[in-house]
Image: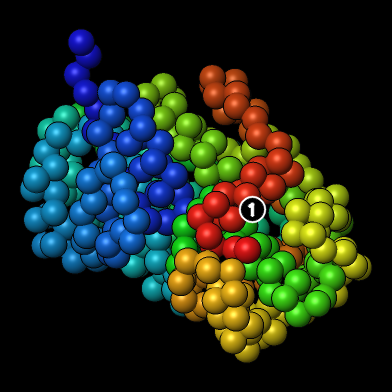
Amino acid sequence: MPEGKTALVAGGLGVIGRALVQHFAERGGWEAVALSRRAPDFETRARHVQVDLLDRAATEAALAGLGGVTHLFYAAYQEWRDPKEQVDINLAMLQNLVRAAGAQAKRLRRVVLYEGVKYYGVHLGPFKTPARENDARHMPPNFYYDQEDWLRAEATGKAWDMAALRPDVVCGFAVGNPMNLTLVIAVYAAISKELGLPLRFPGKTSAYRALAQVTDAAQLARASEWAALSAPAGEAFNITNGDVFRWDQLWPSFARAFGMEVAPPQAIPLSEFMRDKKPVWERIVSRHGLAPYAYETIAAWGFGDFIFNCDYDVISSTTKLRQAGFADVVDSEEMFLRMFEEFRRRRVIP
């Protein structure tokens, strides 16, 4: 019988990490271990280790009991407004964990690093599309560049190697995550309905009609197992659902899913207009018996503002990924509707 594999997931409570932990915990031949600063507030089959990766000594201590790790999945992230701080903090976390794992996990074979379309400059404005993995970088700083360059250099001469995955907006379930678009849409719709409003796209009309893409967290988890076991060493791969869409094609379907009328777009800064909606949300939670998540953690309105005002095409080529052997595709409209139903089952939305 082949030797068992152990997946160590950094950022185990985030939208990427939670899907990874669930995937490996349910797969035969794998043991799943999650790392995060917070303790999980739900039952899980996976082992959970609470640690601050910025604390080098604590990280080394946490890894002391994890010598059997064979594959490290790095999905940890901290948001910082200052670009240099964002680079320094996120690079330090990766370095602390990888160095500790490299020293103590003698069976470590591969580190999978998660990046994103920010690698191509989506946060700076229009960029070349479809984005390809070998496109020229933009002017730094960009913490993805520092992490990838350091990890490549660190892997030289080691028993382990690395690969990188570049999803776009990852859609799944995780509360308190700074980039969970699906929950932004669901909570915004629930509040709009409570106030007797139609469902309006809250961004620019031009963004409503631009081409967009997303990545299903469950599909990313499947791609991660492939990247850990089968992807060529040292390579980076874009990973999206494999389709593109315009929000104006999906918004009517979203409205039907919430039993609402759809209305034309009306650009509002969600981070401002939703600031005073805590009493509305608490009324919804009380009347429908929803899980008591704090309003401050339930939706990342600033992230919604960015996505819904991105009025240029955002498209990544997945040709390299498919040619290398991972060919799964997901219908994005069906994915959103499935996730809204999952949120209902979890008593997150009415």
Residue at (54, 62) in percent of width and height: 348
Quadrant in the rendering for residue 225: top left
> Is residue 174 toward the left or the right of residue 58 in the image?
right
Q: Quadrant of the C terminus?
A: bottom right
Residue 257 appears in the figure: yes
Q: Amino acid at mark 1?
A: Phe
> Is residue 39 toward the left or the right of residue 78 in the image?
left
Mark 1 residue element: helix
Q: Which residue is at the far top?
A: 1
Q: Which residue is mark 1?
A: 340
Residue at (84, 70) in percent of width and height: 198
Relative depth, front residue between 160 and 172 = 172
Horizontal and vertical percent position of residue 217: 52, 44
Horizontal and vertical percent position of residue 281: 60, 78
Position of residue 232 relative to residue 280, above or below, is: above
> Is residue 94 toward the left or the right of residue 115 in the image?
left
Residue at (46, 72) in percent of width and height: 292
Q: Quadrant of the N terminus?
A: top left
Position of residue 30 relative to residue 50, above or below, is: above
Q: Residues within 10 Å of mark 1 (few under 14, many from 20)?
A: many
> Is residue 76 toward the left or the right of residue 174 in the image?
left
Relative depth, front residue between 158 and 7 = 7
Horizontal and vertical percent position of residue 158: 21, 33
Relative depth, front residue between 73 and 17 = 17
The coloring applied to the image is rainbow
Horizontal and vertical percent position of residue 44: 31, 47
